[in-house]
Amino acid sequence: SRVLLTGGSGFIAAHVLDILLERGHSVVTTVRSTEKGQKILDNHPKVSKDKLDFVIVEDIAKPGAFDKAVQSNPPFEVIIHTASPFHFNATDTKKELLDPAVIGTTGILESTKNHAPTVKRVVITSSFASIIDPSKGTRPGYTYSEKDWNPITEEEAVQNPSNGYRASKTFAERASWEFLEKEKPNFTISTMCPPLVLGPIVHYLQSLDNLNTSNQRIAALMTGKAKEELPPTGTFVWTDVRDLALAHVKAAELPEAANKRFFVTTGYFSNEEIADIMRDNFPELKKQLPAKGTKGGGYPEGGLYQYDNSRVKEVLGIEFISLKESIVDAVKSLQAVGA
Ligand code: NDP
């Protein structure tokens, strides 16, 4: 198919892009600057312009931002919308998180409906943030799945940065299902709801200074920042970026994936386990890493919620990469950019 992929410079999108090309799709990706777009083209020297190109969308929060981008010749059949801010340093939650997430999502759906009648499927990167109810804590005995929705309110959204991010994902995904119901567009929607995403960075897009949020805990371990005490794990479920990227592409390809959410979760992890894997596999990092048994970074006492990832396995056929492989490959990719 011919695919419009938003935010191609992002950690997850870079892998989606490569899997799309591998599987024979042709891709136009949106980026915020010519420089970023050119970098992507330069690093795919064997791929022709009709298979891979970019278009500039500077700010997805602007109304009509995607009106031009969704139009192409030959026309698109698929939209994969990954672009959305993921960080915890917003000072203005509405402007920096909620608007780009919500207006970005409804905006691309509107532009698609109005200007890209050939699009049959839209895949949206949502998050476990839109599933989990953080007010319930570690929730032992409860199983999270696609049926769950984070009940976060507009008021709670602006209380702290992590609420801000979670609300941005929840409101954006809700808005996409509401759009489908109200507008009855020509396309179906699939949403991807991963928890913490780990794994290798694509070297030409990221550096230690602009490292994506979810890999920062690995970089912190590598650079000795967690030597005395491991930081709290926070979220205790994860998935590998390559599995998540493949899930996006399969959701675009498979008719059975239409109009479904997918809780793309591999399993549990803790920061302590990440440190153990790094210590076992990278003896050269011994000085920076916390010694075995250093306090912090473990699982909560008293148990933890369970997760149901059966839909991802059954409908999308994903076989999950192990935590060990994910961490080893992530560390190698970070070493390659100078960590
Ligand atoms: P990145 O920060 O690497 O990617 C975010 C992408 O969104 C970048 O391409 C960024 O462009 C773009 N973007 C952000 N804000 C805007 C804006 N206002 N206008 C235009 N583009 C914008 O993070 P990830 O790859 O991790 O995140 C991708 C998606 O996955 C997001 O939707 C995120 O919420 C979701 N997700 C991520 C998880 C994780 O653990 N990594 C977990 C669950 C969901 P630029 O780089 O130019 O700023």
Image (cartoon, rainbow, N blue to C red):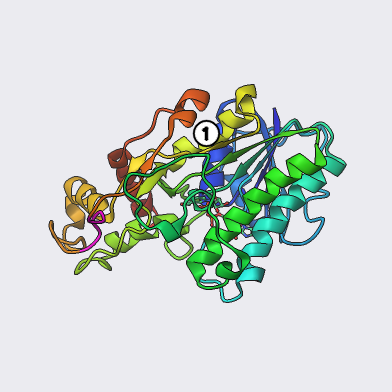
Secondary structure state at the residue bearing disc 1: helix
- Residue displayed at 53% across by 73% down: 159
- Residue displayed at 38% across by 54% down: 235
Q: Quadrant of the N terminus?
A: top right
Foreground residue among 141 and 175: 141
* Rendered view: 315 above or below 286: above
Q: Which amino acid does label 1 sit on?
A: Ala
Main secondary structure type of the part rendered in magenta: loop
Q: Is residue 199 visible?
A: no
Disc 1: which residue: 247
Residues in magenta? 296-301
Foreground residue among 103 and 149: 149
Q: Is residue 71 toward the left or the right of residue 94 in the image?
A: right
Q: Is residue 109 toward the left or the right of residue 25 in the image?
A: right
Q: Is residue 153 toward the left or the right of residue 70 in the image?
A: left
Q: Is residue 14 toward the left or the right of residue 51 in the image?
A: left
Horizontal and vertical percent for residue 313?
Answer: 45, 27
